[in-house]
Each structure stands twice: as structure tokens, then as C-alpha cells.
Image (cartoon, grey):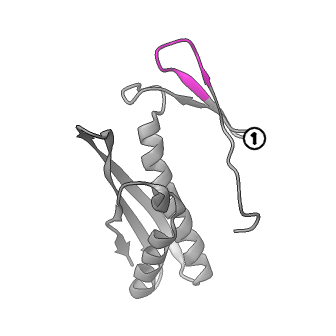
Amino acid sequence: MTGIPMNYQTTYQWQAEAADGVIYIEGHAELLVGRPHDLDRYCPEHLLVAAAETCLANYVIMIASMSNLEVKDYRSSAEGELEHNSKAGYRFKRIIIRPELTIAGTSQALAEQILEKAHNACLIAHSLNCPVDIEPRIII
């Protein structure tokens, strides 16, 4: 990465309704945010899990490209498990990301190495205070 340190700026505005708010990021569409059970808004918990999932995907695609691995399809699902600790309150116990990578040829060993490198490189996972595990599936 060039230009380190990098800064990421957001702006939040409450909309005078429960937890309804909007996140603004310059040059991007508005992001409607709210509580975990609001169906028409994203909640911080979902965004945290999605950030870890997307970070892994970005690294997989980037490393695969640099390694000349032809990726035909990439998709994943992720799950964040919340727990309550009497001393610390609510917190994420762990996040599991299940990437499914469809590749050309018979490069399963290379795909496994790329997934491991991407997992180890993901800056979001390294920034969290809970384990982020992967359960990959490779399709040839």
C-alpha cells in the first residue's frame, strides 16, 4: 500500500427517529444505518462482519491475480457470533468467513496457499479483538 498512513473519513447524522442515521462517505452513496433488527437499515454489527468478509475477498482476488490463478467465481458468507460477558458486556466471540472459490485448472494447492495468505494479510481481521476464522471451499 502506498501513502501510509492512510485515513478513512466518515460522517454520521442522526435522523431524529430511534437509532436511524445516515453515514456519509465523500464520493459514495449514503448508507442508512440503524439497529440490528431494522430491516430497512444496516446495523454496525452487520457492517463489522461484512467488513471482515469483504476484506478477505479483496485480498484473495488481489493475491490470486498476482499469482496467475484464474478465479472463475468468488462468493462467501460470514457469521459473527455475539456473546455477553458479565465483566465486558456484549462483544463478538468470533467471526467465521466461508469463502467459496471456483478456479480454472487443477491449482487447488495454489488456491489453498492464496486463501491462507489472504487470511493472514486481512487488515480488518488483524484489527479486531476476536478471532476471525475461515472455512474455505475450493471448486475446480
Provide residue 24's location: percent of width, then percent of height: 67, 33
**129 lies above or below 41:** below
Residue sitting nearer the eye, 119 or 58: 119
Residue sitting nearer the eye, 13 or 129: 129
Q: At 50% from the left edge and 62% from the top edge, which residue is drawn?
A: 57
* Residue 113: quadrant of the picture: bottom left
**63 lies above or below 23:** below
Tell me the quadrant of the picture where the C terminus can be found.
bottom left
Could you classify mark 1 by the number of other residues whose Cα lies within 10 Å: few (under 14), some (14-19), or many (20 or more)?
Answer: few
Provide residue 100's location: percent of width, then percent of height: 39, 66
Q: At 51% from the left edge and 20% from the top edge, which residue is drawn?
A: 20
- The kind of secondary structure element at disc 1 is loop
Q: Which residue is the site of mark 1?
A: 27
Tell me the kind of residue under disc 1: Gly
Residue 63 visible: yes
122 relative to 100 in the view: left or right: right
Q: Which residues are magenta?
A: 13-22
Residue lying furthest top: 16
Q: At 45% from the left edge and 85% from the top edge, which residue is drawn?
A: 110
**48 lies above or below 130:** above
* Main secondary structure type of the part rendered in magenta: loop
Q: At 76% from the left edge and 64% from the top edge, which residue is drawn?
A: 3
Question: Is 123 part of what is drawn in magenta?
Answer: no
Residue 106 visible: no
Total marks placed: 1
Tell me the quadrant of the picture where the N terminus can be found.
bottom right
60 relative to 140 in the view: left or right: right
Provide residue 139's location: percent of width, then percent of height: 37, 74
* Residue 102: quadrant of the picture: bottom left
Question: Is 16 part of what is drawn in magenta?
Answer: yes
